Image (tube, coloured by chain):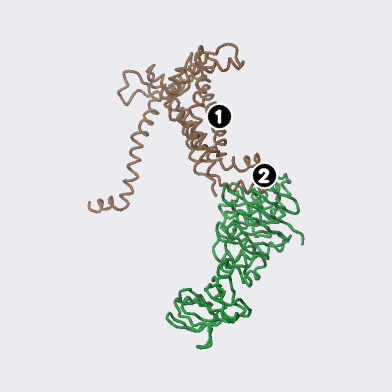
Amino acid sequence: MKRLLSSVRDGSGFDIVLVALPLGFLFLMAGLPLLYNILMSFQEVDMFSLGTFLRPFVGFKNYTDLFAQPETWPILGNTAIFVIGSIAGQFLIGFGLALFFWVNFPGASWLRGLFLVSWVMPGLVVGAIWNWILSGDFGVLNFMLRETGIISGNIFWRSDPNYSLYAVIMANIWLGTAFNMILLSVGLASIPGDLYEAAELDGANAWQRFWTITLPMMRSTIGAIVSLGLIFTLQQFDLFAAITSGGPNNSSNVTQYWAWDLSFRQYDFAKGATISVIMIVFVMFASVVYVRSTRHEVRG
Amino acid sequence: MTKQIELSGVNKYYGAFHALKNIDLSIDKGSFVALVGPSGCGKSTLLRSLAGLESISTGDLKIAGELMNNVPPRKRDIAMVFQSYALYPHMTVEQNLTYSLRIRGVAKAEARKAAEEVAATTGLSQLLGRYPRELSGGQRQRVAMSRAIIRHPKAFLFDEPLSNLDAALRVHMRKEIRTLHDRLGATSVYVTHDQIEAMTMADHVVVMKDGVIEQQGAPLELYDKPANKFVAGFIGSPAMNFVPAVVGEDGRSLAVDVGEKQTIVLDRQLQPGRKVTAGLRPEHLHFVEPGQGVFRLPVGIVESTGSATYITTSTVAEVTIVETSRRPVRTGDVIDVSIRPADVHVFDGETGLRV
């Protein structure tokens, strides 16, 4: 007993305690719900069996049922468009801004800080702001497009099935650009300046320096930011709740919103869990890419 | 001799700070020039101005006869070896070497051949496939030099290239760089704060301080006839001893003040009574039998390196003596020291200029 105590105080026992505490926390707070979610996707769940743990096992029935539903593939397609559109927009605008502020004109660093305003705002607030901007009758966006002659009649961004998904994508790009910009700025700042001087003396012009020095040196940052973007956009829920509620007629519905809708509005918990499991696969993939790209940093 | 680099009346300002003051310097084709001075003296600014990484405020800068004031670095055809080496971390050694060729659109096979040729002369043949992070400091240094050599530039610029290496490797690379310079028939400008590097490597040494060229010339010329106190103290190791002195009434002797007044004989005529500073190199002071010396000095600190003994006196104006004989000396001894009249440097007491 005494030896055990002293080992815990100063020895390998102490190390085990240090490892066990966070592992235990992770298992309780993340591992168990995750496993429970996976378990539910293989069970028949209804309002009466909610409180129990062992419910009738149905195998892959929930999965086959899900893919038999007519709205499943369109919603998966919407999710893909939402993810790709959001990441592309956030990354390209964010990279552009990061390069712009990299010029380091007077006031560049605090102006860059101001851009974070969009990122610190709650998604529901951002959604409310964009509801105003996107409003069909009196929205600023329609006003500008009309006045510049790009459109002739008002677009009902939130209620037109052709535009509803893009309305959310726009808001999401606005929300996530600043975060992209900050991470990319950090990446740019960590490239040693003398590499550019060496390249310049080696005869490279600005464009060649960007392609041969900046981009390759940013590879790990870009890998990290794209995989983080995938994780964040698959988590984006507030904007859908605030702007379109997935409608009209699922035209702007995506998996993460649909899973919530099935579970907590239609009380079809098994299907909700099934969608979540499918999403977990994608997020896990993104996490692996993220971890790999932060580990393979090319530095000096 | 054709001039490869010519600077006339070059000034550089950073806002109100005057970094380079009226620099006139011409560098012969094929020569090895060292810019040396304490940190902040402007030597790196001067080098970066040659490369075009800094622009000069006024004056003319010519490379191979062409005015380069407003030519961007990539069009100057000059190669530089950075203190940090500035190797491209995401490229292999071969890609590092061929970068400038690939930028110019040289065919792949040709670039590869050039890389192999250069690698063979710098001993990198086995390392072409490695990344810079997998190389030792000395190997990185070689890659940086090879990257410069492969281009056959109009001039090589070195910005303290050896300061990140350990002492033994530094001495070795010193010779290697100089050998390479001779073999290539290159024109090199070499910045260092280490006067030994400058003295051993260069044909022509430029000593700078506070943005001004204090003196330039062949290494031994600087050692034998320093133009002022600063150059005298900077060139030579250990540094020259400076002792306040007054010219004697005969004009051919100095009354030096090392704790007590002592007289040394001069080999030239000076104005009697003039206040001067006597400059005595530690290696020019020699032990002599008691009573035969010019100086009698109390010994303060004795440091022995084996090959030489460094003796610092306990007088007010400290005097250092380098003695290669193994004569035993201990702290507290009083020793007799002499110096040849020709080895006595005299500087004006106020301006510090050579008399």
Q: Is residue A300 above or below residue B272?
A: above
Residue at left offset 64%, top offset 71%: B225
Q: Nearer the viewer, residue B210 or B251?
A: B251
Label number found at residue A184: none
Residue A289 can be seen in this image: no
From this view, report whether residue A257 is shown above or below residue B338: above
Q: Earlier in the sequence, mark 1 or mark 2?
A: 1
The CA span between labels 1 and 2 is 28 Å
Q: Position of residue B238 (x, y in %)?
A: 54, 71
> Label 2 crowding class (10 Å Cα cut-off): few <14, some 14-19, many 20+?
many
User: Which residue does the image show at 52% across and 23% down from the upper left?
Assistant: A170
What residue is shown with label 1? A88
Looking at the rendered image, the quarter that the N terminus of chain B falls into is bottom right
The answer to whether marks 1 and 2 mark residues whose Cβ atoms lie closer than 8 Å is no
Q: Secondary structure at mark 1?
A: helix
Q: Nearer the viewer, residue B111 or B306?
A: B306
Mark 1 residue crowding within 10 angstroms, few (<14) / some (14–19) / many (20+):
some
Going by the image, does B287 lie left or right of A7?
right
Q: Colour of chain A?
A: brown
Chain B colour in the picture: green
Q: Quadrant of the C terminus of chain B?
A: bottom right
**Residue at disc 2, secondary structure:** loop
Residue B19 in the image: state x and y as whole percent.
Answer: 59, 53
